[in-house]
């Protein structure tokens, strides 16, 4: 990276999406300026850098924004392809599969898990959401198989795409009343392996920190009381 290049990451501490970009920049050893966004009071900078969705994370490279974390993750891999191994497998089919499961994580796991910990719906609906969440996590566990990483022997794109979610595992377990260790032991071991990497240990919050924070939010505001709006207003 030339000296005059400037990399800025706008994010929010507990965001699984932001964690992707922290891990990716750290893996590629790219220095960057970090801006923590206070989401209910979005800064002008965020609104300028992501006028369409107004969401974090945003990667700003030499003044130009890259929105959507999976797109920004691929961008980092493309721009700094000479810095370390590519996050993506070289085989086009395996690349397509890594992208597919990354979308699955955001389309399925994120939304189901949010319904579970926010305790959305009646008891019956909550039970169905929980079952589907566990089923989705088990599907991912099958994708991992007996490999150490989703990238096979090496830590790659799908590992980076999913590892930020591990900060939320205790929250999923607590509000969903299930045990990740019993349901998905291979995923739990995978998290332990990933956490041994400096890039992950320095970027992904411990699950207990997010749980403490969510407990406090639930105590103060209760379930189903516009948590989505208040969640970002209080720090641990
Ligand atoms: C999701 C970003 C997102 O939901 C991505 O970048 O991958 N698909 C996008 N960001 C949330 C915070 S993390 O839960 C956000 O910015 N929310 C603020 C808002 O919705 O106003």
Image (cartoon, rainbow, N blue to C red):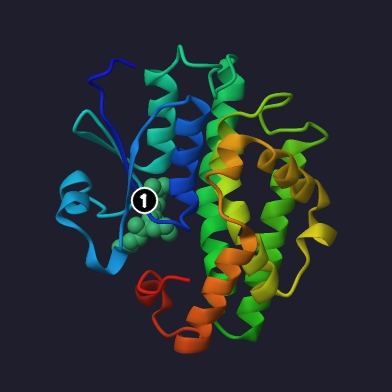
Question: Horizontally, is 41 left or right of 154 in the view?
Answer: left
Residue 101 visible in the displayed image: no
Image quarter of residue 113 = bottom right
Kindly tell me whether mark 1's CB lies below 8 Å from ligand 1: no
Instruction: Answer with the quadrant where ligand 1 appears in the image.
Output: bottom left
Q: Nearer the viewer, residue 97 or 222?
A: 222
Query: What residue is rendered at 73% in x and 75% in y?
Result: 177
Expressed as whole percent of the image width and height from the top left, the position of residue 123 reads 64, 85
Q: Which residue is mark 1?
A: 11
Q: Nearer the viewer, residue 76 or 136?
A: 76
Expressed as whole percent of the image width and height from the top left, the position of residue 186 reads 80, 46
Query: What residue is rendered at 15% in x and 48% in y?
Result: 48
Question: Horizontally, is 186 left or right of 212 in the view?
Answer: right
115 relative to 103, above or below: below
Image quarter of residue 25 = top left
Q: Residue furthest top?
A: 82
| Numbered disc 1: secondary structure | strand
Query: What residue is rendered at 43% in x and 47% in y?
Result: 18
Residue 213 visible in the displayed image: yes
Q: Nearer the viewer, residue 232 or 112?
A: 232
Expressed as whole percent of the image width and height from the top left, the position of residue 30 reads 41, 27
Label 1 CA crowd tier, 10 Å (few <14, some 14–19, many 20+): many
Expressed as whole percent of the image width and height from the top left, the position of residue 102 reads 54, 40
118 relative to 138, above or below: below
Query: What residue is rendered at 68% in x and 33% in y?
Result: 150
């Amino acid at each position: 990276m030339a000296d005059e290049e400037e990399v800025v990451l706008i994010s929010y501490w507990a965001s699984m999406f932001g964690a992707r970009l922290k891990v990716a920049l750290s893996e590629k050893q790219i220095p960057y300026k970090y801006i923590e966004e206070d989401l209910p009071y979005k800064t002008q900078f965020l609104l300028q850098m992501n006028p369409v969705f107004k969401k974090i994370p945003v990667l700003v490279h030499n003044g130009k924004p890259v929105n959507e974390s999976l797109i920004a993750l691929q961008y980092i891999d493309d721009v700094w392809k000479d810095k370390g191994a590519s996050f993506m497998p070289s085989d086009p089919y395996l690349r397509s599969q890594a992208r597919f499961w990354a979308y699955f994580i955001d389309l399925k796991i994120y939304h189901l898990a949010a319904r579970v910990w926010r305790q959305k719906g009646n008891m019956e609906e909550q039970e169905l959401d929980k079952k589907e969440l566990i089923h989705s996590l088990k599907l991912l566990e099958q994708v991992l198989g007996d490999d150490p990483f989703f990238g096979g022997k090496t830590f790659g794109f799908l590992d980076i795409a999913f590892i930020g979610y591990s900060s939320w595992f205790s929250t999923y377990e607590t509000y969903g009343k299930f045990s990740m260790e019993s349901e998905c032991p291979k995923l739990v071991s995978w998290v332990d392996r990933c956490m041994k990497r400096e890039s992950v240990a320095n970027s992904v919050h411990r699950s207990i920190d997010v749980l403490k924070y969510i407990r406090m939010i639930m105590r103060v505001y209760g379930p189903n009381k516009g948590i989505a709006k208040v969640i970002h207003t209080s720090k641990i």
